[in-house]
Image: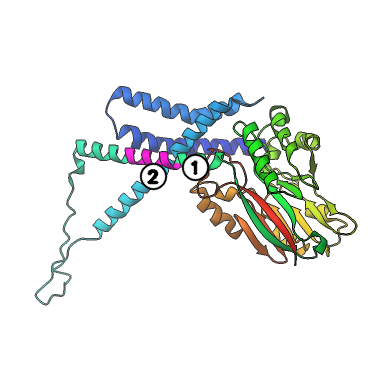
Amino acid sequence: MLGLRIAFGLVALLVFGGLNFFLFKRLIVDVTTNAWVKRGLSVLLVSTYAAVPLLRWWGADGMPPQTATLVVLIFWGLLLNVLLVLVGFEAVKWWVNRRAAKGAPVHAVASGVPTLESVSVVPPVTPAVDDPQRRQFLARVGAATALGVGGGLTTFGVYKALTPPEITEVPVRIPGLPKALEGFTIVQLSDIHVGAVIQEKFLDVLVSEANRAKPDLVAITGDLVDGSPNSLGRYVARLRNLNSKFGTYFCSGNHDYYSGWERWAAVLPDFGFTVLRNRFVTIGDAGASFDLVGVEDWGRMGVGDYDLEAATAGRDPSRASVLLAHQPSNLEAVSAKNLGLQLSGHTHGGQLFPGTLVGALMWQERNTGLSKHGNSQLYTSRGCGFVGPPMRIGAPPEVVKLVLTSA
């Protein structure tokens, strides 16, 4: 697993290095001829590129400073948005040039119908953009526009990521649900990503929003943390303040594995969590109840101990049931087990463009919201927190309030 993560990290650094070179060309080389300005902007760009791995190294045995991490990640988000605008400009320029190349004039003969002999290709007129001053002026206009649009997108994205998540209320019919449990409320929290940025204030607001939904039960569907219990335990302890009749239940996500899942599994019960590791529990009483099933993470980059067979061993398949599984995967097997509803996260709904587009292509109807798969239903949460740049664009965070009704 460590080798895969190192390889992934090296590939990511190479990709980001290439993108930073493109930014260097468009925002620095094409914009100014002043040597000192070039050096200063180049140092800023290289420092930003190197800052994230340096911060991760700094935080190997703890958490890097919250403010420094927040500033660096916001700046990375700004560069990403500026990059997207500049790439958009390049695409428009390519399209315009392609249209111009196809627009060669044709000379007609007297009949009005052009002949092969009468066709003369007129070479395209070279505009005055080859003039260095004009070219630099256009480059400066493009860079300023990209910075302005990118800055606006970044400001909006940071605002959406750091303000309280919206409560999404979803009625769901569960086969076999006893009438006495009609209206039973599950509040789902997913992908909180407690770490260098998401700490006390964020968690206190999140708890307040979850409690405002008045849950009968709280389900946390993985990716709780990005760090060790020694570093983050005091923050995760804030989730003790979640209030519900039947308590808080948890299944692991891939980031929990990256963060030392066995150590977290040992301490989460101290914070009031019931950890479901490939097993199920009964929610309710002898008069009216349903099965709450939880599985380990499906697995990614060599991690995950997902075992649906073990989780459902000995369960009566005719009973109402809800499955907690971090990734919206293995739905054919879930449907075959007659599990009424699966609650997942992992996708973040794409979090921000172009991730929203990639997520929709990869996961399709499983990317976000409620969908049906055979005998089962799936709700994929957009999540509460974020990874990478603290931004949400096109996929706002949510606290999901699921109201169960009998089918």
Residue found farthest to the left: 110
Q: Is residue 38 left or right of residue 75?
A: left
The chief SS type of the magenta part is helix
Q: Distance between the residues labelled 2 and 1?
A: 15 Å
Quadrant for residue 28, please give it.
top left
**Residue stretch in magenta:** 143-153
Residue found farthest to the top: 36
Query: Where in the figure is residue 245, as x and y percent of width and height?
Result: 80, 47
Q: Is residue 52 left or right of residue 146?
A: right
Q: Nearer the viewer, residue 333 or 80?
A: 80
Q: Examine the rendering and report whether any part of residue 16 can be seen.
A: yes
Q: Name the residue under label 1.
A: 157
Q: What kind of residue is marked 1?
A: Gly
Quadrant for residue 63, please give it.
top right
Residue at 46 percent across and 26 percent down: it is 47
Circles 2 and 1: CB atoms closer than 8 Å: no
Query: Where in the figure is residue 45, as x and y percent of width and height?
Result: 42, 29
Q: Residue 223 carries which label?
A: none
Q: Examine the rendering and report whether any part of residue 300 can be seen.
A: no
Residue at 66 percent across and 64 percent down: it is 372
Q: Nearer the viewer, residue 130 or 346?
A: 346
Residue at 59 percent across and 32 percent down: it is 197
Residue at 75 percent across and 44 percent down: it is 250
Q: In which quarter of the image is the C terminus?
A: bottom right
